[in-house]
Each structure stands twice: as structure tokens, then as C-alpha cells.
Image (tube, grey):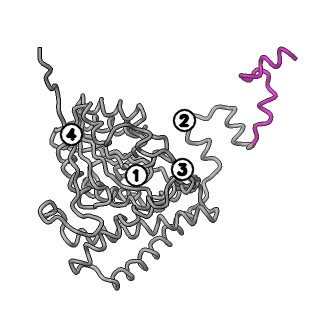
Amino acid sequence: MPIRTAYTAQIEYLQILDENGQFDEKLGKDLLAPEEVVFLYQHMVTCRALDQIAFKLQRSGRMGTYPQNKGQEAAAIGSGYAAKKGVDFLVPCYRENAALFLHGLPMHYVLLHWMGDERGNKIPEGVQQLPLCIPIGTQMLHATGIAWAFKMRKEPRVAITYFGDGATSEGDFHEAMNFASTFQVPCVFFCQNNQWAISVPRETQTASETIAQKAIAYGMPSIQVDGNDLFAVFKASREAIERARGGGGPSLIEAVTYRLGDHTTADDARRYRDAQELEMWQGKDPMIRLRKYLVDRGLWDDEKEAAHQEKSKAIVQEVVKAAEGIEKPSIDDIFDFTYATLPAELEAQKRTLRTSSLGQDPEQAGLQGEAQRA
């Protein structure tokens, strides 16, 4: 019997606005109105300003470890703007601040999170998103479950989940993709391929030529986009979201971008990343190219830029003030929100703020053997 081809596939790459500000008029026609682009650029500038201040807060000891979002704003904003605020559900990793803010998360909540204040994880009523997810990949399973609930309830809603290229090597990624595709749930998997899984380059942690092709194994549509191109990200995200909303099942979007900062403030990328590579990607900065687009069309100028930079500084100052000025939590909180009725031993701890007396009880679990040997 002759050998025949069982299956063939190809991965499309979408770019509408390149690093030189050149715009594909055909692909980008009627995609975003001029006032929308201005608004999204302004949001990008403000989010970059917050990112820079967050870095300084950590360096000055006023905040814990922080992962900068710098360089990946277009991926977050383009996809977040394509989703319906108050309807669709965002399930983030930790470099999607700009998308979360678009959907109503108060900006100071992110700072509270990295300051170690759990109140930063209490999502306000009506804001459709989960808190930042630090374990790599687990949020994809959460998003799949949320999307499955939407389908079972027959709600025209979509879950979009974010993750990095390194997360696609986690088992959670494959389990979520397989379940989502098998049950055709309305979920969009959005990979921010920033080229680095902490210090491990993309080509070392996966042999796949693209991340997008991983969806082929699950019978799921996918596309690779220029992740620093706001227009391409928005177009691909809108199509995937509306396909999911219409019953067409999940999709995978690979946004090719770059982490301009260190992995976190606990990292020093100079130890493993080539300086020339960083310089090349700095020239592809999404904020620079979007500004070029606006200037070329007479929608932006130096005066407007200076004015909005000042406005962003003022906004960020208020955000920092809100985070640092929040009332200190009560010590009682660690006791009051675990049990419906507080056990007697915890009631004693709460009343005395001491645990030393408990360890003297030989009946306490873990100490019985010691008591017998004595």
C-alpha cells in the first residue's frame, strides 16, 4: 500500500504594524477607531509608568519581589481590549497588569499583592477576573473550568487565560488544552512568548518551532502574532474570542514579544542574556511603534506626550499613596476567616497571641512519641 499523508497543517503569522510604524492598511482597515488607538496608547504609557515605579518601590525596600511588564504591554492591552468588560473572564499570570486594569481592577491592588497584602487579591465585585497566579501554568486549568461552566450554563461568555512560553512545558498546559478542546469550551489560551522561561531560552525548553503549533495536537485553531503589535494582537484576540462565544470552541494565540526587564527584581538577566539581543528588541518596543503610528497620522505630538507623561506620573503617585496608605489589617484576621466557629485552641492563641503553652501538652499530635520515650 502506498504511503499517504494523514494530516497537514500550517501556522499563520500576523503583523499589521511593524517596528518602524508601517501599517498594513488592508489588514488593519476599520480595526480600531483613531480615538480608541489614542486611548490605548495613553493606557500603555500609564502602565509603563506604574511598572517603573513598582521597580523602584522594590529597590527601595517598600515592596517585595516584582516582575516587570515592560515590553509586553501591547500583548496584554490588545487581548484585554478585545474581551468584553464585565462579561468575559480574565485568568492572568503576572505580566498582564494592563489588561486587568482595562477590566476594572484598581491599579493599587497589584502593588498590594507584591507588598504581601492579601487584600490585593480580593477582586472587587463585578470585576470578572481571578487574582494574579504565581505557580506556573495552574491558571490554565482554572480558566478551562470557568469556560466549561459558561458552556453548561449556556452563557455567551468567554474565559481568556495568559501564560508564558515556559508554561507550555508544564503538564497543566496540556491537560487544559486537551480538556478545553475535547469539550469545546469557550476559552482562549494566550501565550506571551517573551523568549525566556526565567533564564532558559525558548529553544532550550521546547523543540517546537512555534508555540502555536502545539494546538494542532488538540485539534484547536491557533495563530502566531507579533505580540508587540497592538493591532495584530487585537485582531487575533477578537476573532478567537468571538469564535469561542459563538460555540466554535477554544483557540491558542502565540504573541511573540520580549521581556525587556529581568524575570523579576530577584533576577539579573545580564548573567544569561546577550546585550545585543536586548538592544534589538528594545527597537521593537510596542510603545515606540504605536507612538510612531499616531504621530504619522497627526493624532499625537510632543506636547501631548509631555502632558500625558505628567498625567501618568500623577496617577501613579495616587496609586502608590493608596497602596502604602491602606489601613493595617487586624491580627484577628488570621483567625477570623478560616473557621465558621473558632476551635478552642485557636481561640486561646487569638486571646493570648502565644503558642508556647500548647507545645507542653503531650497529647498534642507529633509530641506523643517524645513523651513516651521520656
Structural distance between the alpha carbons of marks 1 and 2: 44 Å
Labels 2 & 4 near each other (Cβ < 8 A): no
Disc with the residue nearer the chain's start (4 vs 3): 3
The residue beneath circle 4 is 221
Give, as a three-letter code, the residue at label 1: Asn
User: SS for tag 3?
Assistant: helix
- In this view, the residue in front, 266 or 339, is 266
Structural distance between the alpha carbons of marks 2 and 3: 20 Å
Q: Which residue is drawn at 24% across and 29% down?
A: 183
The residue beneath circle 3 is 118
x, y percentage for residue 131? 44, 48
Structural distance between the alpha carbons of marks 4 and 3: 37 Å
Per the rendering, the mark at residue 194 is 1
Is 373 colored magenta in this rendering? yes
Give, as a three-letter code, the residue at label 4: Pro
Q: In which quarter of the image is residue 155?
A: top left
Disc with the residue nearer the chain's start (1 vs 3): 3
Structural distance between the alpha carbons of marks 1 and 3: 28 Å
The residue beneath circle 2 is 340
Q: Residues within 10 Å of mark 3 (few under 14, many from 20)?
A: few
Give, as a three-letter code, the residue at label 2: Ala
Which marked residue is nearer to the observer: mark 1 or mark 3?
1
Structural distance between the alpha carbons of marks 2 and 4: 46 Å
Q: What stretch is highlighted in magenta?
A: 354-374
Above-or-below relation of 132 to 172: below
Which marked residue is nearer to the observer: mark 1 or mark 4?
1
Q: Which residue is drawn at 22% across and 47% down?
A: 241
Labels 4 & 3 near each other (Cβ < 8 A): no
Per the rendering, the mark at residue 356 is none
* Left or right of 181, for residue 302: right
